[in-house]
Structure formats: C-alpha cells, structure tokens
Image (cartoon, grey):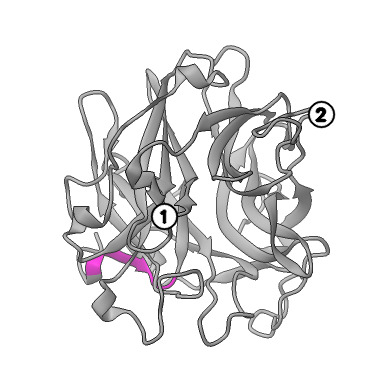
C-alpha cells in the first residue's frame, strides 16, 4: 500500500482526513485536507475545501480533486469557477474532516470569522443530505460557526468556548454511552493550545449541548518546542472498552509528533480525571530515523479488506530535500499526506510506529 515514495498518498496536502463509506459494490474512500499556501504566493491557499473519491486508498493519489467551497476572501477562484464562494467563512481554511453524523454528511473545518484577519479562526460546519453525493458542491449548505453552550467557561475563567483561537474540531460517537453519545473535540488556545471536549446532539451538531471540559493540556517536554506549546489535531477511536484520543503536539516543523490520551468507554468523558495521557509520543521524526520529519495530524481507516488498520498522517521530507527558502512553517507546502499499515496491541490500542511503510 503506497510502499513506494515514502508512503505519500497526496503531495502537499496537510492535515489529511480519510473517510471510508461502504458502498453497494464495495468501499468508497474520501480524502480531504488543507490546501496549502506557498512561500512565493502566501495569499493563495488555505482558501478552499477540497475532496477526492476513490474505490481504494491508493486510488486517492491520482483521483481528481473537487473544490466544494471557496473562502469568501479567496484571491483567485478561477481554477474551480463553479464552486460556491462562502458568504461567511474566510481564510484560513484548515483541517477539514468529512463525517456522517445522524445519517447526514458534514464537513467540520476551521475558518476565520473576519475577512481581514486570517488568524481569527473558529470551528465551522457544512451539511449535505445523507442521500446526496458529497462530491457535488451543490449538495452542501453552510451551517455556520459552531455555537458554544450558553455560559460555557473555559480556561482562563470568564471566557466562553470558541472565544479564543480555536481549530481542528473532530466528532465521534460512543453508542450506548450514558449521558451523551456524540461528542466533539477541538483545540483551543487561550495562551497554550489545549484540547477541549463537549457533547452535541447528532440531529443538530452545530451547537454544543453542555459546558465543554478540558481534555488534555501539554505537560511533557516533547509537547513543547520553545514557546510553542500545543495539543491539537485530535482523532478519536472508540473500542469495546476505551475512548482513544490521538493528538498532535509541538511546532509544525520536525518537532511535530503524535500522542495519545484515553478514557474508559463507560467513564464520564467530561471529567478531566477520566483521561490518562501516555508520556511518550507514538509517532515522531525518530520513528522514521529522520527519513520523514514532523509526522502528525492523523486519521484512521482500513485497507480494502476491511480489517487491516492504517494511519493517514502528514510529514515533511528530510531537510536536505526542502525547497530553497523553506522554513518548515505554514507557507512551506512540503507536508505530504502519507499512509502506512499499523496494528492493535493487546489492549486494542492502535500503535503507530512499529511497522514502517
């Protein structure tokens, strides 16, 4: 499975998210990701929601990419003139994810609320009817920005959820869970970037239904690089006895790495005491002996057999292969979406770094 070319699934696509849907004649795979800026053209990019479709993971590499939506302040929409231009979402568009929630399609993504400030980002949603074609831009409706529960206070006190720099929202369901079954997790940065969690109603996922709670905060050295102190990019796996929240930490260069925090499946997921964070990263530059740098912002799927687990992640090539002037920052597009086979350990935890592509 893409064992060649360092496991690259899609070049210059960061924050990759793969969704597998069971179709009438077999699995259908969808890939969305952040569309990058470049050092030469920093005003172009992070300005569109893109989606690919294929009947195999490998097929996503060459699959055509459809623009579902342009940012309201996109500088150039000529490459997809038939895609709608948003009336409310502005650059930066980051980390889109395709989900089915309550039987319907949703794209969860990050967008700025302000035309002139790319950093005023908050979680946002698009919706499409569950029977519609998610590859058709006309299927999608802008729901708006995710709404905090009234009176929701997060760190520091007296601040509502989504008051600060907020991004990377994901959703998951724990069938039969007492209290709530469907939740969202996102990164919020009042001073440092923490993970927060809140329940939602699957029939109206745009609004949190209870006060959010702190899920994880950077506490280990590997989660920090100088002043960059980050937990972000959550991806959730629910097993028979655990809720596993994988996340990315540290700066977006070669220091980026993947960690894990988990809670018992039947625990109160809004209680910070329910969560146990592993002390070491599960995937890092060291996992590849430097051949890939800064792996992170993952999602999970299975191979076509429906059994073999895979992780989809982005990583940069070694510094010797970076383009001239590249600094490993957000305007360096060399974060490539990659895929590799992984396995479950005896506790059902997906372990990421033991099997190389």
Looking at the image, which residue is at 47% across and 54% down? Answer: 227
Q: Cα distance, mark 2 to mark 1?
A: 35 Å
Picture layout, residue 155 above or below residue 211: below
Looking at the image, which residue is at 62% across and 53% down? Answer: 109
SS for callout 1: loop
Residue 78 is left or right of residue 330, and the answer is right
Of 226 and 136, nearer the camera is 226
SS for callout 2: loop
In which quadrant of the rendered view does residue 307 lie?
top left
Q: Where does the image place residue 242, in percent across and percent down from the top left?
A: 39, 22
| Numbered mark located on residue 150 in the image | 2
Residue 262 is left or right of residue 42, and the answer is left
Of 7 and 146, nearer the camera is 146
Q: Is residue 227 visible?
A: yes
In which quadrant of the rendered view does residue 317 lie?
bottom left
Of 8 and 277, nearer the camera is 277
Q: Where does the image place residue 146, in percent across and percent down from the top left?
A: 73, 43
Of 213 and 224, nearer the camera is 224
Magenta stretch in the rendered image = 6-12
| Numbered mark located on residue 131 in the image | none
Q: Residue furthest front?
A: 226
Look at mark 1 in the image and give the residue it sits on.
Answer: 226
Q: Is residue 51 magenta?
A: no
Quarter of the picture containing the N terminus is bottom left
In which quadrant of the rendered view does residue 72 lie?
bottom right
């Amino acid at each position: 499975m893409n064992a060649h070319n360092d496991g690259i699934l899609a070049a210059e696509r960061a924050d990759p998210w793969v969704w597998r849907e069971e179709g009438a004649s077999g699995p259908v795979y969808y890939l969305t990701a952040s569309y990058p800026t470049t050092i030469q053209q920093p005003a172009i990019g992070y300005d569109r929601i893109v989606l690919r479709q294929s009947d195999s993971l490998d097929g996503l590499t060459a699959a055509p990419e459809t623009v579902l939506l342009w940012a309201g302040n996109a500088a150039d929409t000529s490459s997809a003139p038939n895609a709608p231009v948003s009336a409310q979402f502005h650059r930066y568009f980051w980390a889109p994810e395709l989900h089915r929630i309550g039987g319907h399609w949703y794209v969860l993504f990050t967008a700025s609320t302000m035309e002139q400030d790319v950093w005023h980002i908050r979680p946002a949603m698009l919706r499409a009817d569950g029977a519609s074609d998610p590859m058709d831009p006309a299927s999608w409706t802008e729901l708006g920005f995710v709404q905090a529960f009234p009176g929701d206070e997060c760190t520091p006190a007296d601040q509502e959820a989504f008051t600060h720099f907020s991004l990377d929202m994901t959703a998951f369901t724990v069938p039969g869970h007492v209290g709530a079954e469907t939740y969202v997790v996102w990164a919020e940065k009042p001073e440092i970037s923490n993970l927060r969690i809140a329940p939602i109603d699957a029939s109206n996922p745009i609004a949190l239904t209870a006060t959010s709670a702190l899920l994880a905060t950077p506490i280990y050295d590997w989660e920090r690089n100088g002043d960059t102190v980050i937990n972000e990019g959550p991806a959730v796996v629910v097993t028979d006895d655990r809720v596993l929240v994988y996340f990315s930490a540290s700066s977006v260069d070669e220091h980026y790495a993947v960690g894990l925090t988990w809670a018992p499946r039947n625990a109160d997921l809004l209680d910070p005491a329910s969560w146990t964070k592993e002390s070491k990263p599960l995937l890092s530059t060291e996992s590849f002996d430097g051949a890939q740098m800064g792996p992170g912002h993952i999602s999970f799927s299975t191979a076509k057999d429906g059994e073999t687990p895979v992780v989809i992640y982005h990583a940069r090539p070694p510094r010797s292969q970076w383009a001239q002037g590249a600094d490993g920052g957000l305007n360096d597009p060399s974060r490539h979406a990659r895929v590799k086979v992984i396995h479950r350990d005896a506790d059902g935890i997906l372990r990421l770094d033991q099997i190389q592509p």
